[in-house]
């Protein structure tokens, strides 16, 4: 552990260096700052020739400083500078009424609704499947290999035909997207819940048997509480996956609303800053959802007496 | 499964077959005894059913499955008759029900057999999911052709398979474009870079403490969203797909490999110290081998992610080949059988890839407790 404290580049007193907050956040902060610095350098390097060509086309005299300033505020840069993305993000979040089609809040809500519905369906389906697998040896041995195979099928490749087929059946809008994200996110939940339902050790199961508990009582009083930590761990994985599913499901239909639609139109019209701010919105959504699940996990844990 | 239920099931299957002899197969065709090709097959299936019902214990599995196969064959032969396909009636569905019931009973019986030693157990373990899959595919085929589902909605597996065989050259170029160039290149670079950075992060604890939260954060992001940006930077051809795959695979490998490198126990570390091992010696002899299970875990996760990443990147622009490109254009032209052929290709490639990683894992981590039973 000595090498770690030596590597800290802070010059302050020893007490400050060993302060738990510093010890915890200094490395992360350094990494983030380094990333931002690298980003700015990359933005200058990648946009340089673009901006210079612009000056040359207009045949105005320019200096290196002009080009440098230009790379920071180009309209369609190859790589926008972080402050440009931040500005556009805040502008499109707070600059318009939340339901205007130019507002990022509106697009995020569209994607979020599909994500949540798909997540709910996937979580239900995944848990029920896990329950069946735990209770039936036949299903475990015949179904589980196919569930694993189903994840080897690049499910996102199914998205376009799925939407075509459901559209032909008269289903539009939210449901096809939700079904795709449900298909994507049920797998981690099934696997996690099978692990969770089988996590009580033989001693506890035998105790239940000495009390002559019915299978249903074993499920509700032992297996289900024991599987809660596994449930939350797999829910955190699944919620990101279902967000990915909802975004990708918006691509093949050329949907007019949603984060995926923003990505698609941004890439069609070369609106790089719009593209990046849509990505930031997706990142905010996914970390927000994960944080929310973490909060629920903590309160459930408290109520169950974990802490 | 107890004997009475088993006997009841096989008797029900026999009854269904008997009903198939009298009920109409389809509006414009004669009942079953008029088909010289089919009724001997159905009769043989019935005989096997009666045999299975008489035995109704472990020995009933083989006649039951044989009867299921015969009934399946009969239903497929009947579907070749244009009068039956698309407008099948009760008699036809009775055959399908008998087939499905006996297949289910056979699989349940097989899965319920007490565990036997060695090779036979492995065959049974393989046979159970295989039979289950075959039944599902048969039901899909029969339902699509019997009800006459328009192929635009859902093609029969046989027509997708035919399309697969006849368009092998196109599938071959798509496979090379998407899988060999895009996925494999990106996978190798992404996983390699993730492992290298993890080794650095393990060597320098400051770097590790900074990178781990960032890696966790980034691996939870919907990173496939960068696909349009990568297409903008690296052009339409495979480098942009490989770049997406690199990004998607990098962070899971980083996080898992850091966890794995820290998995070596205190006693082993102290042993290395007492031998006076240099860091590179300790790395190759202790830390990396101890991290192998974690690294393979990441390799397996990445095998799925990589294929998805490459296919999604192709939705944003490709040269006129590649699995994702073909899927989106053929779906636009309503050539759904071609789409399913491409999906089958992607699934086969993905399973082969995953299987290969698993085999490599078995070969290199044979010492791990989970493989030493």
Image (cartoon, grey):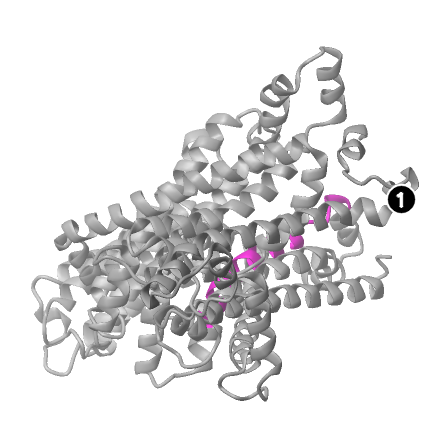
Is the C terminus of chain A in the top left, top right, bottom left or bottom right quadrant? bottom right
Nearer to the camera, A75 or B33: A75
Residue at left offset 41%, top offset 34%: B120
**Please, is residue A260 above or below residue B345 in the view?**
below
Q: Is residue A200 magenta?
A: yes
Is the N terminus of chain A in the top left, top right, bottom left or bottom right quadrant? top right
Nearer to the camera, A281 or B349: A281
Q: Which residues are magenta?
A: A179-203
Residue at left offset 36%, top offset 42%: B184
Q: Is residue B151 magenta?
A: no
Q: Is residue B69 visible?
A: yes
Q: Is residue B95 visible?
A: no
Residue at left offset 59%, top offset 83%: A95
Please give the chain letter of the residue carrying mark 1: A
**A16 sits to left or right of B281:** right
- State the image coordinates of residue B77 (x, y, percent, origin top left): 14, 63
**B197 sits to left or right of A150:** right
Provide the residue designation for mark 1: A16
**Please, is residue A158 above or below residue A192 in the view?**
below
Residue at left offset 78%, top offset 66%: A300
- State the image coordinates of residue A111 (x, y, percent, origin top left): 51, 75
């Amino acid at each position: 552990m000595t090498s770690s404290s030596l590597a800290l580049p802070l010059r302050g007193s020893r007490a400050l260096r060993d302060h738990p907050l510093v010890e915890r956040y200094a490395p992360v902060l350094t990494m983030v700052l380094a990333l931002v610095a690298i980003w700015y350098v990359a933005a200058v390097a990648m946009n340089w020739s673009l901006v210079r060509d612009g000056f040359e086309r207009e045949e105005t005299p320019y200096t290196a400083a002009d080009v440098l300033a230009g790379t920071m505020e180009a309209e369609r840069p190859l790589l926008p500078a972080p402050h440009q993305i931040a500005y556009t993000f805040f502008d499109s979040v707070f600059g318009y009424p939340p339901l205007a089609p130019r507002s990022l809040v509106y697009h995020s809500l569209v994607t979020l609704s599909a994500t949540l519905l798909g997540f709910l369906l996937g979580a239900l389906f995944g848990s029920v499947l896990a329950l069946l697998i735990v209770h039936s040896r036949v299903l475990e041995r015949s179904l589980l290999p196919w569930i694993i195979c189903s994840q080897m099928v690049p499910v996102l490749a199914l998205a376009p035909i799925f939407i075509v087929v459901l559209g032909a059946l008269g289903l539009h809008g939210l449901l096809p997207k939700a079904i795709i994200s449900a298909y994507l996110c049920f797998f981690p939940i099934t696997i996690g819940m099978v692990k969770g339902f089988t996590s009580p050790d033989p001693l506890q199961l035998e105790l239940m048997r000495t009390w002559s508990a019915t299978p249903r009582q074993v499920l509700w009083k032992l297996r289900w509480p024991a599987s809660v930590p596994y449930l939350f761990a797999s829910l955190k994985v699944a919620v990101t996956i279902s967000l990915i599913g909802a975004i990708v499901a918006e691509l093949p239909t050329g949907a007019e609303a949603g984060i995926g639609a923003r990505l698609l139109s941004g890439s069609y019209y070369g609106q790089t800053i719009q593209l990046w701010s849509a990505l930031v919105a997706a990142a905010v959504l996914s970390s927000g959802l994960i944080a929310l699940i973490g909060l629920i996990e903590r309160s459930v844990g408290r109520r169950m007496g974990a802490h | 499964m107890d004997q009475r239920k088993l006997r009841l099931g096989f008797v029900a299957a026999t009854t269904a077959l008997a009903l198939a002899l009298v009920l109409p197969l389809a509006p414009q065709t004669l009942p079953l005894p008029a088909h010289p090709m089919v009724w001997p097959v159905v009769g043989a299936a019935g005989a096997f059913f009666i045999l299975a019902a008489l035995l109704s214990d472990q020995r009933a599995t083989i006649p039951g499955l044989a009867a299921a196969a015969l009934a399946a064959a009969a239903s497929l032969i009947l579907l070749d008759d244009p009068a039956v396909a698309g407008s099948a009636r009760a008699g036809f569905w009775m055959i399908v029900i008998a087939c499905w019931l006996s297949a289910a009973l056979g699989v349940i019986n097989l899965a319920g057999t007490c565990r036997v030693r060695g090779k036979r157990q492995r065959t049974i373990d393989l046979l159970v999911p295989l039979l289950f899959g075959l039944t599902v595919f048969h039901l899909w085929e029969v339902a699509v052709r019997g009800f006459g589902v328009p192929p635009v909605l859902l093609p029969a597996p046989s027509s997708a398979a035919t399309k697969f065989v006849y368009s092998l050259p196109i599938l071959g170029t798509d496979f090379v474009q998407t899988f060999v160039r895009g996925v494999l290149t990106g996978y190798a670079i992404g996983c390699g870079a993730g492992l290298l950075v993890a080794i650095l992060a393990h060597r320098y604890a400051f770097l590790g403490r900074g990178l781990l939260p960032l890696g966790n954060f980034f691996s939870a992001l919907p990173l496939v969203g960068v696909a349009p940006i990568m297409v903008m930077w690296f052009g339409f051809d495979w480098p942009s797909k490989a770049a997406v795959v690199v990004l998607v695979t990098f962070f899971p490998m980083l996080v898992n490999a850091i966890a794995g490198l820290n998995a070596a126990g205190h006693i082993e570390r102290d042993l290395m110290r007492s031998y006076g091992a240099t860091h590179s010696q300790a790395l190759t002899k202790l830390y990396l081998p101890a991290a192998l299970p974690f690294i393979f875990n990441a390799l397996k996760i990445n095998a799925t992610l990589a294929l998805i990443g490459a296919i999604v990147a192709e939705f944003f622009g490709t040269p006129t080949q590649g699995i994702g490109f073909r899927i989106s254009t053929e779906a636009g032209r309503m050539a759904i059988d071609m789409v399913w052929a491409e999906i089958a290709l992607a699934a086969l490639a993905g399973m082969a890839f995953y299987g290969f990683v698993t085999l490599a894992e078995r070969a290199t981590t044979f010492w791990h407790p989970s493989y030493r039973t």
